[in-house]
Image (cartoon, helix red, strand yellow):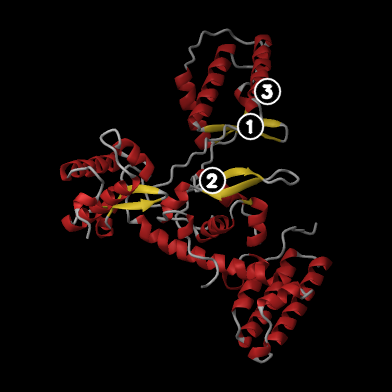
């Protein structure tokens, strides 16, 4: 649809190609999702770039990867961009990590996690009231795994801790942000 | 001695946890036949469980009767023609125990979302991210037991033991004690017989040098997270550190 000339005013085709490569290099080296803002900040040390331009360039990269049938893709997860392998190669990559079992959460843990995700911020007592059984060891385990975090205290007797889900939670389930959580009530 | 338990009697009907979940199941099922079976099974299970707990608990018995009465009330409502059946909002106003129904339904929906999340998790597990390990990084620091027992106390106890050694009579022998050796010895002791009592480890017949080396070995093992100190019945003992098992599809 758009030609490459419309990507950003004043940037030549070569400059945009170079910027795409910079973005690719950044995504390659990063250890966490990169926001548009962060990428823009770095690109501007090369030449002026708008946020829209960043997103358009990423879009082009994504298309390039599809055309070239790359084994990985650029995806938007947990509020930023990152590289993820294609599903097709799952069985092969699994073999790289064969000695460490993939960690899936139990049904009980996932339920507690869901309660927190949909009702956050929420205290342990409130979670237990919903679930009807003790949740302290599950919540401790979830906190250790970095999926939930203490985000403050409730202004009530005892000042109990409030919990919310973390960026790690978003990454684990592949959500871009919490709005991607399916609605609680049936539509 | 009769066994008393404080937790509410939960029913194991069809893999539920807790009485709430059970009630929830009944809400979901609108077929009366299923409710009939559930009530019967419920009664049988309850009676069996009561015998287990040994000794009738009047409060729980009354609670059960109340729940049963409410369930029968619910069942009677469901016998009404569809257009006269109560909605969730109606239950909110009612003064019956079913004012908790909306809460239960919400829990039901959360359970469904959790199920979907587990499916999504399977899909996500096959997608590997650049720059990240595909497993959880457990951040917990291994407990040394020193949260409940400050290090000063441990140090004081050691110094007392050391002082006692000075007064003990015994043959004077020059022996070499190495921290490294003591560490290995302690590791062996841990696998054979745990817990190791403080009193045994620092008994007065040992030489001061041996005690010092032993104490250093203990501290090192604590640092490595292999050992922790616990207080039981006023006695101190060293036990191997227990690590929590990572879940592999088992219930936490």
* Secondary element type, mark 1: loop
Percent coordinates x, y for residue B133 in the rendering: 36, 44
Percent coordinates x, y for residue A114 in the rendering: 53, 59
Q: In this picture, is A122 found above or below B155?
A: below
Q: In this picture, is A182 found above or below B208?
A: below
Disc 1 packing (10 Å; few <14; some 14–19; many ≥20): few
* Quarter occupied by residue B193: top right
Give the residue displayed 77% in from the left and 58% down from the top.
B4
Q: Chain under label 1?
A: B
Q: Chain under label 2?
A: A
Q: In this picture, is A180 found above or below B14?
A: above
Q: Nearer the viewer, residue B48 or B86?
A: B86
* Secondary element type, mark 3: helix
Percent coordinates x, y for residue A147 in the rendering: 50, 48
In which quadrant is the N terminus of chain A drawn? bottom left
Q: Which residue is mark 1?
A: B147
Disc 2 packing (10 Å; few <14; some 14–19; many ≥20): many
Q: Is residue B16 visible?
A: no
* Quarter occupied by residue A69: bottom left
Q: Which residue is mark 3?
A: B153
Whether the residues at callouts 2 and 3 have beta carbons within 8 Å, the answer is: no
Q: Is residue B141 visible?
A: yes
Q: Which residue is mark 2?
A: A143
Q: Are marks 2 and 1 on the same chain?
A: no
* Quarter occupied by residue A160: top right
Q: Nearer the viewer, residue B135 or B82?
A: B82
Q: Earlier in the sequence, mark 1 or mark 3?
A: 1
């Amino acid at each position: 649809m758009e030609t490459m000339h419309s990507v950003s005013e004043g940037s030549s085709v070569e400059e945009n190609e170079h910027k795409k490569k910079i973005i690719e290099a950044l995504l390659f080296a990063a250890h966490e999702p990169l926001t548009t803002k962060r990428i823009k900040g770095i690109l501007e040390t090369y030449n002026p770039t708008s946020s829209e331009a960043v997103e358009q360039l990423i879009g082009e990269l994504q298309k390039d990867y599809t055309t070239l049938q790359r084994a990985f893709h650029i995806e938007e997860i947990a509020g930023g961009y990152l590289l993820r392998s294609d599903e097709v190669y799952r069985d092969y990559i699994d073999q790289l990590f064969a000695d460490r079992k993939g960690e899936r959460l139990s049904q009980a843990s996932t339920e507690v996690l869901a309660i927190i995700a949909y009702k956050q911020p929420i205290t342990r007592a409130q979670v237990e009231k919903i679930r009807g059984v003790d949740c302290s060891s599950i919540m401790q385990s979830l906190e250790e795994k970095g999926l939930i975090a203490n985000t403050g205290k409730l202004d009530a007797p005892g000042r109990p801790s409030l919990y919310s889900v973390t960026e790690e939670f978003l990454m684990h389930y592949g959500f871009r942000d919490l709005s991607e959580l399916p609605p609680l009530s049936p539509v | 001695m009769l066994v008393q338990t404080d937790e509410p009697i939960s029913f194991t009907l069809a893999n539920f946890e807790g009485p709430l979940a059970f009630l929830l199941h009944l809400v979901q099922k609108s077929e009366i036949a299923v409710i009939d079976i559930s009530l019967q099974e419920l009664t049988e299970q309850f009676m069996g469980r009561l015998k287990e707990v040994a000794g009738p608990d009047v409060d729980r018995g009354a609670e059960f009767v109340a729940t049963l009465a409410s369930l029968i009330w619910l069942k009677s409502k469901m016998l009404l023609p569809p257009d006269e059946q109560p909605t969730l909002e109606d239950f909110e106003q009612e003064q019956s125990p079913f004012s908790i129904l909306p809460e239960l339904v919400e829990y039901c929906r959360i359970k469904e979302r959790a199920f979907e999340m587990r499916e999504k998790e399977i899909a996500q597990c096959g997608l590997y991210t650049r720059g990240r390990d595909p497993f959880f990084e457990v951040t917990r620091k291994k407990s040394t037991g020193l949260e409940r027992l400050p290090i000063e106390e441990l140090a004081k106890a050691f110094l007392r033991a050391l002082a006692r050694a000075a007064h003990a009579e015994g043959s004077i022998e020059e022996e070499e004690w190495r921290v490294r050796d003591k560490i290995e010895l302690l590791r062996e002791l841990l696998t054979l017989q745990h817990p190791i009592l403080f009193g045994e480890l620092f008994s007065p017949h040992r030489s001061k040098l041996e005690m010092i080396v032993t104490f250093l070995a203990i501290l090192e093992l604590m640092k490595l997270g292999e050992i922790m100190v616990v207080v039981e019945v006023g006695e101190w003992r060293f036990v191997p550190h227990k690590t929590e098992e990572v879940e592999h599809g088992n219930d936490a």
